[in-house]
Structures are given as structure tokens and as C-alpha cells.
């Protein structure tokens, strides 16, 4: 009988190993941080940004930071695994505020010449008044700025990102456009997680 406590201790110790191992594995799994930033005057681009953020949050372990471009700090930028930038279309291009945001990467945040955003995931979304009003050009200019910083750009919801038409026959953002924005956010989070976990092919 004097060996009973020893046997019980061994039994419960062995039985507890898998759960301890699992908790350790879960703790070692790095979470993904996605920065969703945008400029919006009418509120349309803000709604799209909120949908992108919602989509990113669908991946377990994802932290999402939602900010206007003028509020983003260097710490926000460098601590993120992915950056999704949204802009309204101004004369078939990104807004001045979004362009200033990218200029700040070098002149205010010191991204260059070390390419501090290298290998982070980037994506774009845009809102515009007309069907052919320049949304794709706007997203491409955002992606071009990211590629210039050696980021890994992804799409989702469309060939270049998510977009919404807000005038004419489409006076606001519809459910399909919001679904595309959520899809973009989810894809950004998934690709970021794959890269962070070393599973990208």
C-alpha cells in the first residue's frame, strides 16, 4: 500500500501531459496583428474599413487595430503583421491624406532605408462615386506604395482588393460590397498567419 501514492502520482502525471503540452503549444502560437487604416469624410470608406476589420477578426488569435490614417503611429505600423489601407477616390487616385500617410512612412516614421515594412502583408480597398471612377487605380497606387516598401500584397473581394460604388444607381454601400470587404480582411489575416507560422508556400 505504501506504493499506492507513487502509482497515483505517476498515473495522473502521465494523463496530464497531453493537456499541458497542448496549452504550451497554444501559448507558443503567435497571434497576428492587423492594422486597418483609412481616410473618410462621407463615412463610406469608414464603413468598408469596419467590415475589413470584422473579417480579419474572424480568424482566431487575430488582433485588429482600426485607425484613421492621421492617427497611426510608428509603433502601430511596425508592430503590425499586416496593413490594410483604404481611401476614397479623389480624381482617380488616393486622397491626399492617404498619400501623406505613405509619405510619413519615410519622413516621419523612418521606414526607409532599412525597409522596416519588408515582408509584412499589405492590402487595399477603395470607395468611389462611379462604377468606372478610378477605384482600381486608387487601389493600385496603394499597392504600389506597399510594393515599393517590399511588402507582400494580397487581394480579396476583387482583383486588387475590395471596393464600393457610392453614387448613381448605388447610393450607398450594399451588402455584397461589405461582404467583399470582410473577405479581404479574412484573407489578409489568413495569409499573415501562414507567413508568421512559416507555412506559406
Image: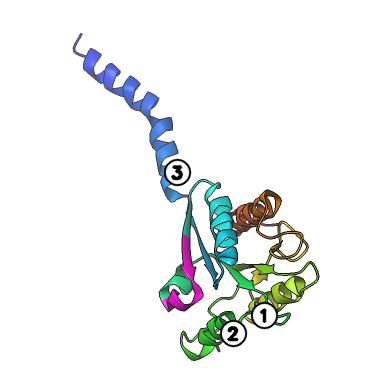
Q: Are marks 2 and 1 in contact (CB under 8 Å)?
A: yes
Magenta range: 65-74
Does residue 159 appear to the left or right of 114 in the view shown? right
Does residue 129 appear to the left or right of 27 in the view shown? right
Give x and y (percent) for residue 173. 65, 57
User: Residue drawn 62% across and 58% down?
Assistant: 188
**Can residue 111 be seen by looking at this rendering?**
no
Characterize the local packing of mark 2: few (<14), some (14-19) or many (20 or more) Cα atoms within 10 angstroms.
Answer: few
Give x and y (percent) for residue 97. 55, 82
Tag 2 or tag 3, which sits nearer the N-term? 3
Is 168 magenta? The answer is no
Q: Which residue is mark 1?
A: 90
Is 73 magenta? The answer is yes
63 or 44: which is nearer to us? 44
Which secondary structure lies at badge 3? helix
View extreme (right): residue: 132
Question: Label 3, label 2: how many angstroms apart (C-alpha)?
Answer: 43 Å
Q: Which residue is mark 3?
A: 26
84 or 110: which is nearer to us? 84
Image disc number at residue 96: 2
Give x and y (percent) for residue 29. 48, 50
Quadrant of the rendering where the N terminus is positioned: top left
In this rendering, the count of numbered labels is 3
Quadrant of the rendering where the C terminus is positioned: bottom right
Which secondary structure lies at badge 1? loop
Characterize the local packing of mark 3: few (<14), some (14-19) or many (20 or more) Cα atoms within 10 angstroms.
Answer: few
Does residue 136 appear to the left or right of 84 in the view shown? right
Residue 177 in the image: above or below residue 121: above
Image disc number at residue 46: none
Tag 3 or tag 1, which sits nearer the N-term? 3
The color scheme shown is rainbow
Question: Label 2, label 1: how many angstroms apart (C-alpha)?
Answer: 8 Å
Amino acid at each position: 500500500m505504501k506504493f499506492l501514492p507513487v502509482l497515483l502520482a505517476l498515473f495522473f502525471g502521465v494523463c496530464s501531459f497531453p493537456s499541458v503540452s497542448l496549452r504550451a503549444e497554444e501559448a507558443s502560437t503567435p497571434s497576428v496583428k492587423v492594422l486597418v487604416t483609412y481616410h473618410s469624410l462621407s463615412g463610406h470608406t469608414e464603413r468598408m474599413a469596419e467590415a475589413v476589420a470584422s473579417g480579419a477578426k474572424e480568424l482566431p488569435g487575430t488582433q485588429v487595430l482600426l485607425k484613421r490614417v492621421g492617427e497611426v503611429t510608428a509603433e502601430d505600423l511596425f508592430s503590425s503583421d499586416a496593413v490594410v489601407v483604404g481611401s476614397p477616390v479623389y480624381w482617380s487616385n488616393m486622397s491626399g491624406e492617404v498619400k501623406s500617410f505613405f509619405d510619413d512612412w519615410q519622413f516621419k516614421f523612418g521606414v526607409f532605408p532599412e525597409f522596416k515594412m519588408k515582408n509584412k502583408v499589405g492590402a487595399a480597398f477603395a470607395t468611389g462615386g462611379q462604377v468606372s471612377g478610378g477605384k482600381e487605380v486608387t487601389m493600385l497606387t496603394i499597392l504600389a506604395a506597399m510594393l515599393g516598401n517590399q511588402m507582400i500584397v494580397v487581394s480579396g473581394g476583387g482583383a486588387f482588393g475590395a471596393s464600393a460604388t457610392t453614387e448613381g444607381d448605388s447610393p450607398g454601400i450594399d451588402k455584397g460590397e461589405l461582404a467583399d470587404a470582410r473577405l479581404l480582411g479574412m484573407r489578409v489575416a489568413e495569409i499573415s498567419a501562414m507567413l508568421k507560422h512559416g507555412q506559406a508556400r
